Amino acid sequence: MANAKRPTTTTARAAARPPAEEAEERAAHAEARLAELEAAMAATREELVRVSAERDAHKELVQRVAADFDNYRKRQIREREQQALAANERLVLDLLPVLDALELAVDAFDNHEAEKVREGVAYVHRALLAALEKAGATTIDPHGTVFDPAEHEALMAMPDPTADEGVVLQVHQRGFRLGDRVIRPARVVIAAPAEES
């Protein structure tokens, strides 16, 4: 039996330890590992609480900003509606004297007073032009000027030996600008090129 192996000293020592001591060591190691895991879980819970609170704060901020924007949008719509109403009110107030004058002209017409009708219609014309000018509208009366497609609409071209080609000969309907913008072009007749004989 000389060939039989002898146990090494570590294995001999481990085999020499009582099973209770070995179980206690394993239990201590497991408790230490459990404490590490519990600490990691506590840290994870704290991080989760912190991140959740941060998320809730951001969510609340986003909701507040969305509500503020919605209120701003509604306020802008109300203000635009009020501005339009105020502008319409001014225009209506400017047109009421025109209506009054027109009613007087109709009454004069009913009473066969031709001169008063003419005066009334002329007054209505002046009052209406004044109301339009007060609203910011200006007339485009291009008679004798060179045709400009940005401000004029040519109805026809007719030969005129006394006028240069493209000059406005007749204005059928005046145009109007509101500020710098043409809201209705003048409807005109322009001079055609001279016909060659």
Image: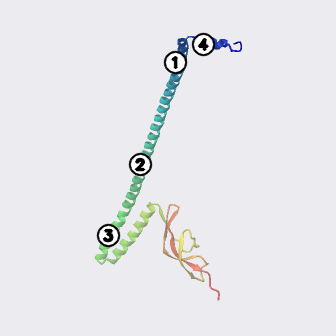
List x then y, in percent, for residue 102.
34, 70
List the residue tagged with mark 1: 31
Give the distance between the C-alpha atoms of the residues marked 4 and 1, in whole angstroms.
Answer: 24 Å
List the residue tagged with mark 4: 15
List x then y, in percent, for residue 124.
38, 69
Q: Amino acid at mark 3?
A: Glu
List the residue tagged with mark 3: 103
Looking at the picture, tell me which residue is in the foreground, 54 or 85: 54
Dot 1 surroundings within 10 Å: few (below 14), some, or many (20 or more)?
few
In the image, taking residue 16 as reference, residue 64 lies left or right, namely: left
In the image, taking residue 85 as reference, residue 161 lies left or right, namely: right
Dot 4 surroundings within 10 Å: few (below 14), some, or many (20 or more)?
few
Looking at the picture, tell me which residue is in the foreground, 40 or 126: 40
List the residue tagged with mark 2: 74
Which circle marks residue 176 in the picture? none
Give the distance between the C-alpha atoms of the residues marked 2 and 4, in whole angstroms.
Answer: 85 Å
Q: Earlier in the sequence, mark 3 or mark 2?
A: 2
Tag 4 secondary structure: helix
Q: Amino acid at mark 2?
A: Lys
Q: Earlier in the sequence, mark 4 or mark 3?
A: 4
